[in-house]
Amino acid sequence: MAATSRSRKSTLAGILVAAAMALGACAIPLPLPQGTPAAAESAASSPAPAADLPSAAPSAVPSAEASATGPGVDGNYGQFSSLSEACLAVSATMLSVTLLPLAALAGGNPDDLQKARQELSQLEDKVPGELKPAFEKLRAYTESAGSDFSKFGEPEFEELLKPIEHWMDKNCK
C-alpha cells in the first residue's frame, strides 16, 4: 500500500513538474522582426502618423478571413493559432486536473471538480485531433466520478492522463 501511495505521489509530482515546464516554455516571448539601421533612421527623421505605420506584432483579434483559413480551424493545432498556444491551454487545464488528487487530501471542494469539468469540456473541442479522444475520456471520467474525489487517486485516472502527458512531452518542449 505504501509503495502504491509513493508511486502515485511521484507520478503526480512528475506531472506537476512537466506542466510547470511546459507553461514556462510556452511563455517565452519571441523576438519581433527588426528593420535595418537605415530604415530606423529614416523612420525617426520623418515620423508618419500611427495609422500609416504597419504593425510588427500580430493582431490580438483574429479577422474572420484569417480564422476561416488559418491553422486555427482544426488544423495541426486544433482550434489554436499556434503550437505554443495549444501547449499553454493544454498545460493549464492539465495542471487544474492533476491537482484534483491534492484537493481530495485537503477535504475536496465541489467547486474544484466543477471547474475542472468545465475546463475539460471547453478545451475538448479546441485541442488538436490526436488529443480529442483522450480529453473526451478524461471529461467523461470526471463526470462519472461525481463528487467522489477518491476517484482521482486511482490508477484508471492516471492512465487517462498518459496520452495527454505524452503529447505534451512530444510537442511542448
Image: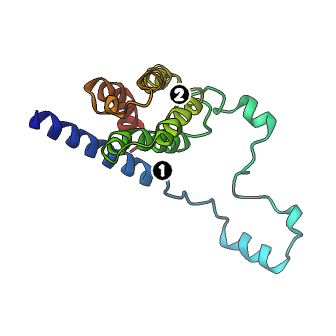
Q: Circle 1: is it few (<14), some (14-19), or many (20+) Cα within 10 Å?
A: some
Please report the residue visible at 30 percent of the width from the left and 29 percent of the height from the top. 158
Amino acid at dot 2: Pro
For the residues labelled 1 and 2, the Cα–Cα distance comes to 17 Å
- Residue nearest the viewer, comparing 71 with 125: 125
- Quarter where residue 105 is shown: top left
Residue 144, given in percent of the width and then of the height, sits at 44, 21
Q: Circle 2: is it few (<14), some (14-19), or many (20+) Cα within 10 Å?
A: many
- Residue nearest the viewer, comparing 46 with 21: 21
Numbered tag placed on residue 77 in the rendering? none
Element on which disc 2 rests: loop
Quadrant that contains the C terminus:
top left
Please report the residue visible at 75 percent of the width from the left and 36 percent of the height from the top. 66
Q: Decide: is 42 above or below 145.
A: below
Q: Are marks 1 and 2 in contact (CB under 8 Å)?
A: no
Q: Is residue 98 left or right of residue 38?
A: left
Please report the residue visible at 37 percent of the width from the left and 44 percent of the height from the top. 103
Element on which disc 1 rests: helix
Numbered tag placed on residue 26 in the rendering? 1
Quadrant that contains the N terminus:
top left
Q: Decide: is 22 above or below 86.
A: below
Q: Which residue is mark 2?
A: 128
Residue 129, given in percent of the width and then of the height, sits at 52, 22
Of callouts 1 and 2, which one flags the residue occurring earlier in the amino acid sequence? Answer: 1
Q: Is residue 62 left or right of residue 111?
A: right
- Residue nearest the viewer, comparing 140 with 160: 140
Q: Is residue 2 left or right of residue 105?
A: left
Residue 113, given in percent of the width and then of the height, sits at 47, 36
Q: Decide: is 134 above or below 14.
A: above
